[in-house]
Image (spheres, rainbow, N blue to C red):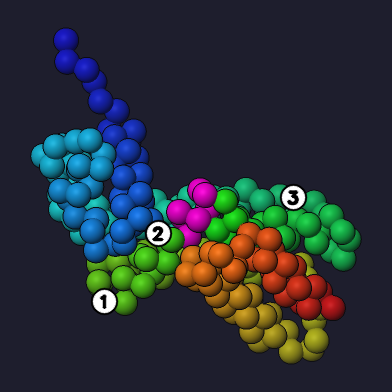
Amino acid sequence: MPKIVDAGARRAEIVEAVFRIIAVDGLERASLREVADEAGLAVGSVRHYFAGSDELLRFSFAAVIDRVVARLTAALPELAASVPGSSAHHEAVLTLLGEFLPLDEERAVDACVWMAFKNAARIRPFLAAEADRSHREVAAVVGQVIMSLVRDDGDGHHSLTVEAERLLATLDGLCMHALLQPGWMTAEMCREVLERHVRSLAA
């Protein structure tokens, strides 16, 4: 009797192969054939689940977005349960924002894949919708962090928007710097820079 293959599990295996290739050799190498080899499958098996490389890459981009956003949103209840200005709230903010940064191997791979897809979306229109979603969903979480940190200075929505964008830029910059200069921008340095930024927001 032939073995029944779970379609969701097989797609997940293929996506993990895409992630491994991007993390080591970049997005350009993530062709159907290379992905099939990395996953230990025939090209025809990959085509059974993805019609072509565009569909595979778009699905993979969506998968890394979902993974990163799931980690961020999972940390929101702890943030909501803490009192703004308390040490517990400060740690909850750092924990939540740290889920976006390459502070361990899993998050480093996700950050590398995330950045590769975001950059590719500039010239590959089929990735544009997911690139927009990635920004919106992370911005929504960061907005909640900002509202818990920043006092109203009378400028209301504009001030909060500016601070949210400043924090998003800090996170993107830390990610890129850590990926390009891992010997200098270590996990400890990332956390220290982030902590100083968070303290400046709360001041």
Q: Is residue 97 above or below residue 7?
A: below
Separation of residues labelled 2 and 3 (CA atoms)? 27 Å
Q: Nearer the viewer, mark 2 or mark 3?
A: 2
Separation of residues labelled 3 and 1 (CA atoms)? 39 Å
Q: Which residue is mark 2?
A: 113
Residue 156, picture quadrant? bottom right
**Badge 2 element:** helix
Which quarter of the rendered picture does the N terminus lie within?
top left
Q: Left or right: where does residue 101 sit relative to residue 42?
A: right
Q: Over which residues does the magenta segment extend?
A: 105-111
Q: Residue at x 67, y 80 (%)?
A: 163
Q: Left or right: where does residue 160 sit relative to residue 110?
A: right
N-terminal of the pair, mark 3 or mark 1, is 3
Q: Is residue 192 above or below residue 88?
A: below
Q: Residue furthest left?
A: 44
**Badge 1 element:** loop
Q: Which mark is residue 78?
A: 3
Q: Is 166 in front, or is 139?
A: 166
Q: Which residue is mark 1?
A: 123
How dense is the environment of label 2, judged by Cα within 10 Å: few (below 14), some, or many (20 and up)? Answer: many
Q: Is 64 in front, or is 186?
A: 186
Q: Position of residue 62 (x, y in %)?
A: 37, 55
- The amino acid type, in three-letter code, at marker 3 is Glu
